[in-house]
Image (cartoon, rainbow, N blue to C red):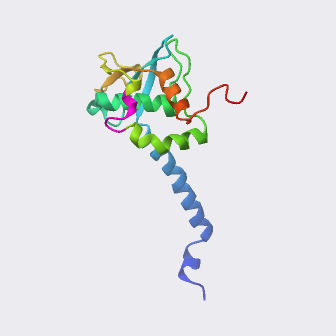
Amino acid sequence: MHSLFHDYINPKITILLFFGVTILAVPVFAQKKFAYQVECVSVETNGSVTIKIWNSKLGKRYDQEKARKDAVDAILKSGVPGNNGCVLQKPLLVTTESIQKFKKIEKAFFAKHGLWSNYTRQATSLNTLPEKIGKKKWKVYQVTIAMDLLRKYLKEKRIIKSLNSGF
């Protein structure tokens, strides 16, 4: 006599369903993690990058401080796509090792009075919206990030390696 489980539910189907749900859940997690979107405005000779940033989940509730934090987060984790005459800005945290090291300090770094604010100036609210968002009433900010200073900080904390560390 077979059990009810074996008669009605094939273990192979159960495994396929598990992996299918897992694979579908990954993009949902990623969307929640990076709800902000960025567009390059300019790359300055002083090592700073100016971007437009908006949050598709928060829309018009997106505030200035969150935009500044997200701008630093983008420089660290996702980078900034190249367009409008800007060169692609790769994320500063590119290795698994650097990502893991940063995770250890991330909460303190992005705290209310954390060091993140040393690497960005006040965000400016924009009246002209990126074409990507059309006529939606989202808040879009222009934020300048001191990418070279942030890179220097990460090197001093030994989160990322300097280019000449292997020579």
Q: Position of residue 43 (x, y in %)?
A: 49, 14
**Residue extending furthest toward the bottom:** 1
34 left or right of 163?
left
Q: Which image quarter holds the N terminus?
A: bottom right
**Residue 46 pos. (x, y %):** 49, 12
Magenta-drawn segment: 111-117
* Residue 32 position within the rendered picture, expressed as x and y whole percent measured from the top left: 41, 42
Which residue is painted at 55% across and 51% down in the image?
A: 23
Is residue 8 part of the magenta span, yes or no?
no
Residue 99 picture location, percent across and down: 54, 40
The residue most toward the right is 167
Which quadrant would the C terminus be assigned to in this image?
Answer: top right
Q: Is residue 117 left or right of residue 23?
A: left
Observer-nearest of 129 and 3:
129
Q: Residue at x 61, y 37 (%)?
A: 95
Say above or below: 96 vs 150: below
Q: Report if residue 92 is visible in the image.
A: no
Nearer to us in this view, 131 or 1: 131
Instruction: Count the labels in the image.
Output: 0
Magenta stretch: includes residue 115: yes
Q: Is residue 94 above or below residue 23?
A: above
Q: Nearer the viewer, residue 166 or 38?
A: 166
Regarding residue 24, the answer to whether it shows in the image is: yes
Residue depicted at x 59% and y 64%: 15
| Rendered position, 100 above or below 17 | above
